[in-house]
Amino acid sequence: MITVENLTKSFQSGNGSVRALNGVTMEVPAGAVCGVVGPSGAGKSTLARCIALLEKPDSGAIRVDGTDLVSLDGRALRAARRQIGVVPQGDSLLRQRTAAGNVALPLEAAGVSGPQRRTRVGELLDLVGLSDKASVYPDQLSGGQRQRIAVARALAAKPSVLLADEPTSALDPGTTDSVLTVLDRARAELGVTVLVVTHDMAVVRKIADDVAVLEDGRVVEHGKVLDLVSEPGSRVSSSLLPATDQAEPLRPSDGRHDVVAEVVLVGFAAVGALLPEAASRFGVELAILGGGLTRLGDTPVAKFKVGLSGERSESALKWMVERDAHVRRAPVCVDGVAA
């Protein structure tokens, strides 16, 4: 588990002090994939560098499995750093070394014997799907293949935490998927806790269990992805779910339907059956007015704007809420004023 408490970090610039992190607090469960997202300058990479012990924060605590890394120095600090694998932003492989030679670098630095080193390198090349590229040099690999080798190198010392800073930057969609699959396999097969810094919400959609949204050095949203997408008005929801008709405000009724609402459905059973079952059970007509279906990891999630017509429309909506549908209604107005 990674726990960050009230982390602050400032840098000096020509215009004075710049606060990159301002009281950041968040928690990443062991074995989870957490996406850290936000606009440029939000503090994402600074947070990753502090957790990786490449930058020392001004104040606050960073705990990995209960150990406060900020308080360590000397041998204890070096040992802690070995528990955190880092995939840097950009192409970081040594050109004079083969793919296998790059993966072996941390093992050589740790004094691992030749036979053990070769076994571990072989395991990692198999994990990232590049066993056939062991003797190939970086310039002969594609950008995505180089990133997968960088992930394998970061995993060489068997870390408990893997930090990846913009691992899919400048990659095409197909190549991006191959890199994200490797990160997900590292979590699933090695039990590594993965922190991914990214500007691309597609990364969160594909592999993240948790997400933290940074803005101006602060965490403005944090939690389980599937929880946040169900919260009306959340930034994560608006970024990950299909849009309904944003140009037209949500109204209690549109003149054609007795009730209009926005409904978020999570999971196979809800997405596939809840709306038609509600219509049938309560004898109402239900029309889809906007929205659509997506997948978050392996979970289907739908967001629809729906119109219901019939005497029991309100009962149908209440029944859906009781079965974990997330329903947003327009505010009730009295004499033109929202209640």
Image (spheres, rainbow, N blue to C red):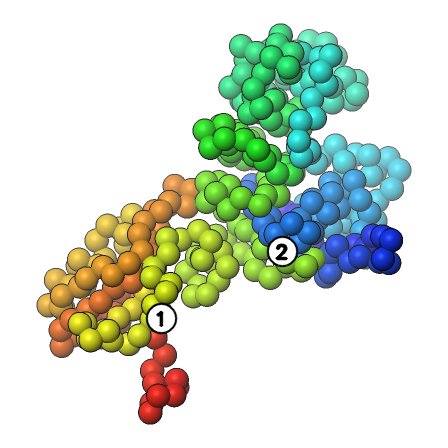
Marks 2, 1: nearer the viewer: 1
Q: Is residue 263 visible?
A: no
Residue pointed to by mark 2: 214
Left or right: 253, with 24 as reference point:
left
| Amino acid carrying mark 2 in the image | Leu
Left or right: 24, with 191 as reference point:
right
Residue 216: x %, y % from top left: 68, 59
Callout 1: helix, strand or loop? loop
Residue 94 figure quarter: top right
- Residue nearer the viewer, 149 or 66: 149
- Residue nearer the viewer, 26 or 291: 291
Q: Is residue 124 visible?
A: yes
Badge 1 density bin: few <14, some 14–19, many ≥20, Cα 10 Å: few
- The residue at 28%/76% (across/down) is 252
Q: Is residue 197 above or below residue 231?
A: above
Badge 2 density bin: few <14, some 14–19, many ≥20, Cα 10 Å: many
Left or right: 263, with 47 as reference point:
left
Q: Are marks 2 and 1 in contact (CB under 8 Å)?
A: no
Left or right: 52, with 164 as reference point:
right
Callout 2: helix, strand or loop? strand
Instruction: Give the Cα separation between the discs numbered 2 and 1.
Output: 28 Å
User: Where, quadrant-wise, is the C terminus in this rendering?
Assistant: bottom left
- The residue at 71%/15% (across/down) is 95
Q: Is residue 278 above or below residue 120?
A: below
| Amino acid carrying mark 1 in the image | Pro
Q: Is residue 145 above or below residue 67?
A: above
Residue 234: x %, y % from top left: 48, 62
- The residue at 55%/25% (across/down) is 144
Residue 148: x %, y % from top left: 58, 25
Residue pointed to by mark 1: 249
Q: How many marks?
A: 2
Residue 297: x %, y % from top left: 42, 42
